[in-house]
Amino acid sequence: MTKTTGTVFGVNGNMVTVDVEGDVSLNEVGYINVGDQKLKSEVIRIRGKQAEMQVFEQTGGIGVGDTVEFSGEMLAVELGPGLLGQVYDGLQNPLPQLAEQAGFFLKRGLYLDAIDKERSWEFTPKLEAGATVSAGDTIGTVPEGIFDHRIMVPFNISGEWTIKKLAPKGSYKVADTICQIEDEKGTTQDLNMIFEWPVKRAISLFEERYKPTEPMVTKVRMIDTFFPVARGGTYCIPGPFGAGKTVLQQITSRHAEVDIVIVAACGERAGEVVETLQEFPELTDPRTGRTLMERTVIICNTSSMPVASREASVYTAVTIAEYYRQMGLNVLLLADSTSRWAQAMREMSGRLEEIPGEEAFPAYLESVIASFYERAGVVRLKDGSFGSVTIGGTVSPAGGNFEEPVTQATLKVVGAFHGLSRERSDARKYPAIHPLESWSKYPSAINDELVAYCRDILLRGNEVSQMMKVVGEEGTSLEDFVLYQKSEFLDSAYMQQNSFDPVDGSVTIERQRHIFRILFDVLASEFDLHDKDNARSYFNQLRQIYLDYNTSEWESDAFKSREAELVKLIDEKRTGYDSTAEDIRNRVGSTVG
Amino acid sequence: MKKIYSRIEEIAGNVITVTAEDVRYSELALVTSGHGKSLAEVIRLRGNKVSLQVYSGGRGISTGDEVQFLGRPMQVSFSDNLLGRIFDGSGRPRDKGPTLEENLIEIGGPSVNPSKRIIPRNMIRTGIPMIDLFNTLVESQKLPIFSVSGEPYNELLSRIAMQAEVDLIILGGMGLKYDDFLFFRDTLEKGGAMDRTIFFVHTASDPVVECLMVPDISLAVAEKFALQGKRVLVLLTDMTNFADSLKEIAITMEQVPSNRGYPGDLYSQLAARYEKAVDFEGAGSITTLGVTTMPGDDVTHPVPDNTGYITEGQYYLRGGRIEPFGSLSRLKQMVNDTTRADHRGLMDGMIRLYANYKESVEKKSMGFRMSEWDQKLLRYGAFFEAKMMDLTVNIPLEEALDLGWEILAECFQSDETGLQSKLLDQFWPRKSTRDEQETA
């Protein structure tokens, strides 16, 4: 089969117009020949005999008449064992290997294999010759880090096939043939351990998709207790610059209770990725005892790298996430930042001279964002096991104003919203999630009624504090003042965390449930406090002990003695229990989770 | 010799269009008109129609003027001969020195591979306490100075240029007032820093396209010096003018504007420049300080807003002082633990007390009674502003730290400062001046 070719007709920024001879499809990949370089590009519009392509490289030096070769394939990633621990650019080129070849700078037109073809893997067959298989079925496994990496029938094979030959247990390279399959017409096909999948198509080889309900524990109290994220769910973190979006994601990528984390650094600062790159191989994953890098894949297309591959990078990331989901694993994809991805779309849309929508974003912005987040989910696979992809994306709204198109389009499709506030980050409160504006539609690991009661205290306490700014402390009743103190206590002792403290930096769900009881006791009790100074000093005292309690090791002597101190202090002053809280308590019983 | 085209078909603003063959994207051309010669760069190809932006502007260009393509992209000469010289945005001398044409390098080169970056580790001393002590500048950092017109940001930059402990300064001026340009030149000459400085200056009266070239040309030269092992500090003023030039060209090219007329790729354009800041393992580094004037003192304006998302913190220059609130060097944590044991503690403690001082000032202005504590804070605030924040203060970090302790001891008892007892034991001045007076 002869491949379609073409010649360059025009260049405008990173968009090239090509006169095509033959058939060409949308999103097909082509290579522009400039001197001895081949520049990867993707067809984004076809008009008559002309195709418009976005080039994944700088376009300087391209001339009219340069030849173009089309590949006949859509933009795809390579899937197989050896993805974990890698650092890729947006097109799945391994960055460390690029550096070995090209030095400090990225070199135009240099593309490398995503998966190491020389490495050997211990293959264990799971089926036998004669078995009937279809796309996505596991034919064997290889150990990758702590996981059994399933070697599956390529997802793009259709129909039922019979295994003719299957390699015995042993050591193979990824490109070695390990299986031969035959369909009913007698055509045979050789399979090895890797295959390609087009990034812009979701992998949908599962039996059923479920509603996300299992909490995905991040070990950040404010998220797990108040604004939880479920496995297979979606959430977004919008915030102005400097509010700590990236920090929150970095911390989540360390502590989240999932099997695999895919970090997509999309159009942000390179310096921030460097920390992850250099620290992850040193840090131990407490769940497995191995380094964090062994459960992580980093897709890194920072702000100064070509814009078109930035657009591709989130798709590359989500495709790899879906691939591991097919192995019955829980995968978390962290995209930072989806605004930069949306801006990449806006740049291309502008070059295509499409009619602009709000703030010049393309009219299809919302549907593209929605279909990206919809690739998350918890699914039952054909073999009965469950896998999930959870997506958390940061949003960088222009001017910190959440009323802009990307934030609004994202809010429509996500299940939880962690809005960061400049005031809280300026006040050095971590996490800077705004407790009154944020929300989550997922169930908390702690009883929802109890949580709702606490949020109510926070809301009313905030009203009092607004009032106090006008009428002063003198004009506030003692009752209101105590309410205000309670809400401050909730904020400073429970919602805020010291991310530098080894204990307080990440809190298990078990511990959250435990310490929540005491928090609830404080919030729900009525105290014998005779004036405001008395109330202030009492709550300061409570807070001080609670903060020390937070930093004492779980179930250590210090932890227990501080808990006893807190209980004693509460009992000393308690005169009764708020009736609403009493009701909830009776209904819920002693279990908070 | 390449063919000369003598028919310009379209002239719109600074962009001209000719019909030509065998032209490459980003290639340079020489436009010869009645007013002299100018370089022009190919910014769009469509069949045989070639659009170029003319560096010296479109004004006065005639349809009959000559265009000759040069077959190469924009380049700049690179050698030690650049030191002490002043050039314009397209690399022509602005001083009386000779034109440099040896060892040409391309500008706007590729991005650094993120996996080759290293975690920043060296502080750059400037002798300005508000920077060294409170928001340390770190090698390979990119920081903007957010300011408004009228503030002494150029004075600040020139002081940093003279005092910063780096090997080389590259000053990129964009839309500079001619007076400001002279000010920079004279100050650096007088201060004896000229021989380690290179100027690329576009003044307000120069053609707008040259403004666009300044950051690229400055950073390309900086990159080469850094690869030779030099620690380079690039000072860019004012990036808002750069963004406005981008806007102007984009509108001329009939691009769809996104926010307040700026092109949709403003973020990428700014990031491509700022991200050049880097520390090369085994070689030198580039650190970038850029002035961004905020139109209407509005930080949500697209230029400061996009800049804030790109850079690693920011300095706010207001009322002739670097504001302690809002200003932030995100990389300071990487270096300020190894300077001196009291650096972090003193930094946090002094800022906390200054915040309390601000509250007291507010209370005072609302007519509330001042408590004894308020009086102490007021005294402290006045000292802090006069001795630390004033931009003329010029002392090394260690002296600044000592000064900090002195100011605290002058105003407070040691236990009022909220600093860790460990630090107080070690650093609290044993005998403050006040004690001496009392004993006397």
Image: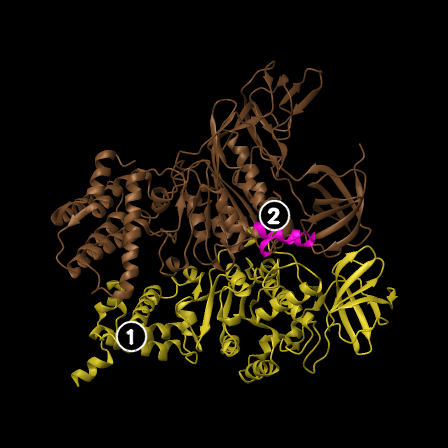
Question: Quick one: label 2, few (<14), some, or many (20+) residues within 10 Å?
Answer: many
The quarter of the displayed image where residue A312 is located: top right
The numbered dot on residue A311 is: 2
Q: Amino acid at mark 1?
A: Met
Q: Find residue B257 and report its image quarter.
A: bottom right
B174 up-or-down from A441: above or below: below
From the viewer's perspective, is residue B363 above or below residue A346?
A: below
From the image, state the color of chain B.
yellow
A582 relative to A394, above or below: above
Residues B223 and A184: in front is A184
- On the image, the x and y values in percent for residue B271 come to 58, 59
- Chain label for disc 2: A
Residue at 32% x, 72% y is B358
Please report the bounds of the magenta region as a residue range: A341-359
Residue that badge 1 annotates: B366
Using the numbered discs, state the Cα–Cα distance from disc 1 to disc 2 in whole angstroms. 53 Å
Label 1 element class:
loop
Task: Please give the name of the residue rendered at 43% of the width and 54% of the height, measured from the top-left corner.
Answer: A244
Q: Amino acid at mark 2?
A: Glu
Q: Nearer the viewer, residue B272 or A365?
A: A365
Task: Give how far across and how far down residue B12 sits, in percent.
Answer: 75, 68
Q: Colour of chain A?
A: brown
Closest to the observer, A487 or B84: A487
Q: Main secondary structure of the magenta part?
A: helix
Secondary element under disc 2, as helix, strand or loop, is helix
Drawn side of residue A527 relative to residue B11, left or right: left
